[in-house]
Image (cartoon, grey):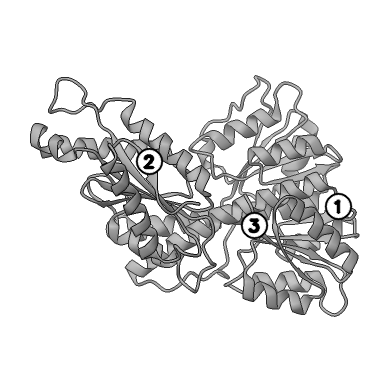
Amino acid sequence: MTARVLVVDDVLHNVKLLEAKLRSEYFDVLTAMNGVDALKIIEAEHPDIILLDVMMPGMDGFEVCRRVKENPTISHIPIIMVTALDQPKDRITGLEAGADDFLTKPIQDLPLFARVKSLVRLKVLMDELRVRDSTGKAFAGDAALDGSASIKLDDAKVLVIEDYERVANRISGYLEDTAAQIDLDDAESGEITTSNLDQYDLFIISLSLRQADGLRLCSMIRSSEITRHTPILVLIDDGDNDRLIQAMEIGVTDYVNRPIDGNELVARVKSQIRHKRFADYLRGKMQKNMEMAVTDSVTNLYNRHFLSTHLDNIFSSENEKPTNVSLLMLDIDFFKIVNDTYGHASGDEVLEEFSKRISSNMRSIDLVARYGGEEFTVIMPETDAEFALFIAERLRRTICDKPFEISGSAEPINITVSIGASIVSEECNTKEKLLAAADKGLYKAKETGRNKVCNISFP
């Protein structure tokens, strides 16, 4: 996953060094040499992440961070503060100013890349939720989202997974004024024994457990539907970069080095809970705005009206320019025969099962909609041509490999789907062109035998 990264530092050598490191990992890099220029670039370019030096003449990094977080239009951009300062109070100052992380010079490559990629993944999810929230408000007539609205931490629940009782109790003491409920789990059985995991706002997991593999526990939490969006903060030995990289790749959202500084832990916990509460707020608002107005009654997917408005938002000049946005147009083959042979009630059963199979194979950031009749559309942000075709082929097999059971037939019936694919490009740069390109690919799939994937716009 690539991204645009803004590097801010008043020392040219530091800027060039970070730029070279990031470009080697195929990030697009912007640069600024002072706080004033950085703010201008942030407001004009909306980078995906900011690497911000603290010690700069005039406006220091703390002040830049505060101004970014006070501006509703750019406050969602993640910030990593970079400095030679290594005192806990400096890290806390940065986190309290709104920074998402704080790295100390000299910066090691692997932790840097892991942190950048982790925060980019978070921003992609938050951006998609913001776009969908805007789409919902377009239907409901609500005012625009106030990005500066205070997110309360009331009733926060934290689960601490640590088998050293003394350490677990010390962590509980640090957090007693931050979380309303702090539960402990020693994972001595090798698994998390606490129930109702979906009720927690944050998991704190030690990677030094004696009876369990902390990374495996992180993986289990991240792969479960009920805890997929819950942040995970791990406790890790200072300098254990290999495990840190593994943790970030799994989807861990933050970490604290041992020995644990209580003030830093509290600052990071508050930041993670705040991120989750904001994401939960967006999801709740989206669901409330959309449920009745923009869902299809048969499939429970978004309808064509929502799809059209969502595409308008993607291409809107008020939002960031879409990059690597792919679209799939799916059409059930010979669906009229199903209706004519088994009846429209059975046809609705096929549509319902079809939508379930498609939805279960998509990511949380993808959008699936019923375009009309037996046609469906999938919008996939941050998806290049190769991956889009891979997903399309997987969806095709998902439909044809397992017959559909319907009440109008004693035997399951075989269903296939034809799929057309398109991707945003310099030529395909509007909603109409994106849909038309996918539709042409779909028509080609139908003409050449059905039950296949075709495209005309990919290079």
Instruction: Return the mark for residue 107.
Output: 1
Q: Earlier in the sequence, mark 2 or mark 3?
A: 3
Whole-number angstrom distance, CA of label 1 to CA of label 2: 45 Å
- Which marked residue is nearer to the observer: mark 3 or mark 1? 3
| Amino acid, disc 2 | Val
The residue where tag 2 is placed is: 453
* Disc 1 packing (10 Å; few <14; some 14–19; many ≥20): few
Label 2 element class: strand
Disc number lying in front (2 or 3): 2
Q: Position of residue 30 (x, y in %)?
A: 72, 67
Residue at point 67% right, 56% down? 271
Residue depicted at x 64% and y 63%: 77
Q: Does residue 14 sit above or below 163 in this rendering? A: below
Decide: few, some or many residues near mark 3? Use Cα within 10 Å; few <14, some 14-19, many ≥20.
Answer: many
Q: Name above or below for residue 442 compared with residue 288.
A: above
The answer to whether residue 283 is left or right of residue 334 is right
- What distance separates the C-alpha of mark 2 from that of mark 3? 29 Å
Q: Which residue is mark 3?
A: 3
Residue 363 appears left or right of 454: right
What residue is shown at x 66% (from left), y 25% (from top)? 187
Q: Amino acid at mark 3?
A: Ala
Counting residues from the N terminus, which is met first, the one under dot 3 or under dot 1?
Answer: 3
Asked whether 285 or 267 is in front, the reply is 285
